[in-house]
Amino acid sequence: MGKTENFVIGLILGAAFGVVAAYIFGPSQATTFDSRYQSRWDRALAEGREAESKKKAELEAELEETKRRHTPGRED
């Protein structure tokens, strides 16, 4: 390949990467730019953290219930 072909390929790949990065880190539709602004990335991270804490609470409750049921010498 020649220098021109490499340049065109690099230009296309760079533009594609820019579009993907702008979509991921840019604002979602109908976003207002105030103190509550979140990009798609920020929103996804916040939802992931919320799901993590809910699942952790569920698993801890299940663990405590299992411990309570299997305590030796205890009759329920």
Image (cartoon, rainbow, N blue to C red):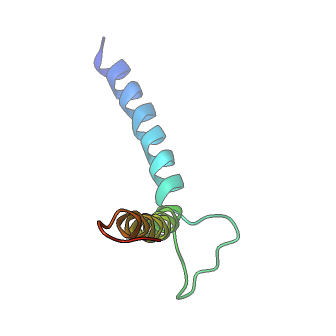
Q: Residue furthest right?
A: 30
Asked where in the image residue 59 lies, by quadrant, the reply is bottom left
- In front of the other: 14 or 73: 73
Residue 11 percent location from the top left of the image:
41, 34
In the displayed structure image, the side of residue 33 where residue 17 appears, left or right: left
In the displayed structure image, the side of residue 67 where residue 54 appears, left or right: right
Residue 2 percent location from the top left of the image:
30, 14
- In front of the other: 21 or 67: 67
Asked where in the image residue 64 lies, by quadrant, the reply is bottom left
Q: Residue furthest top?
A: 1
Residue 13 percent location from the top left of the image:
41, 33
Query: In the image, what residue occupies the spot 44% across and 71% down?
Result: 57
Query: In the image, what residue occupies the spot 29% across and 20% down?
Result: 3
Residue 14 percent location from the top left of the image:
40, 39
In the displayed structure image, the side of residue 40 where residue 75 appears, left or right: left
The answer to whether 72 is drawn above or below residue 36 in the figure is: above
Query: In the image, what residue occupies the spot 52% across and 88% down?
Result: 35
Query: In the image, what residue occupies the spot 34% across and 28% down?
Result: 7
The answer to whether 75 is drawn above or below residue 19 in the figure is: below
Q: Residue furthest bottom?
A: 35
Q: How many marks?
A: 0
- Quadrant showing the N terminus: top left
- In front of the other: 27 or 58: 58
